[in-house]
Amino acid sequence: MITKTIGTDEIAARIAALGQEIRADAGDAPLFLLGILKGASVFLSDLMRAIPGEIAYGFIDTIRDEADTHTATALEIDFLRHIDIAGRNVYVLKDVVSTGIIENYLLAQLRLHKPATLKLVALLDRPSLRTLELAADFRAFEVGEGSYAGYGLELEERWGNLPWIGTV
């Protein structure tokens, strides 16, 4: 059973405001939104339409050891080979930021590609679960423990198509 936690109107309003916050942060500079598959795909789609000005985007995938649920070690980052982030203002979009381990690793790897700026944007941020020092530069919603689904977030390959976010 899934219970609605964040409604469609609340999501739309927050994404619109977040788009304005990101544009204010970047000024008139062109932006590159880098979504982490697959959970950030709906988030990226809506957010890029909420940011005025020049926007480009791409996706990457992180592959991790599913058996390693305590440390969530990122084993491999699958870059789309045609993406060059050198000198670009990159905003990395993540569906849920919890422990921060994967995001910390990913950001360190992305810095090697020398972006002009590199910011982390969370759809759902769970800072109470951090196991290391990491702050999302932007977040749509701060949430607590629990399992979330909807708005592109799947749980056991279900409920990603819901237009709202719920807890299971």
Image (tube, rainbow, N blue to C red):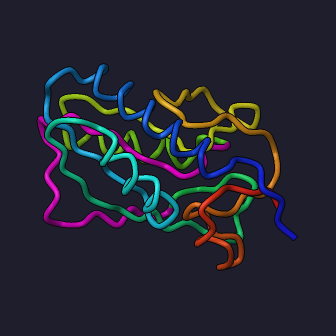
The image shows residue 16, relative to residue 26, as above or below, that is below
What's the residue at 59%, 46% (across, down)? 9
What's the residue at 82%, 66% (across, down)? 2
The answer to if 79 sits in the magenta stretch is yes
Left or right, 28 with reference to 34: left
| Quadrant position of the C terminus in the picture | bottom right
The image shows residue 126, relative to residue 28, as above or below, that is below
Closest to the observer, 146 or 28:
28
What's the residue at 35%, 28% (across, down)? 20
| Quadrant position of the N terminus in the picture | bottom right
Q: Quadrant of residue 31?
A: top left
Can you give x and y, in whole percent of width and height, for residue 126 in the image? Answer: 69, 38
The span shown in magenta is 75-98
Figure label count: 0
Left or right, 29 with reference to 15: left
The image shows residue 89, relative to residue 40, as above or below, that is above
What's the residue at 46%, 45% (across, down)? 105
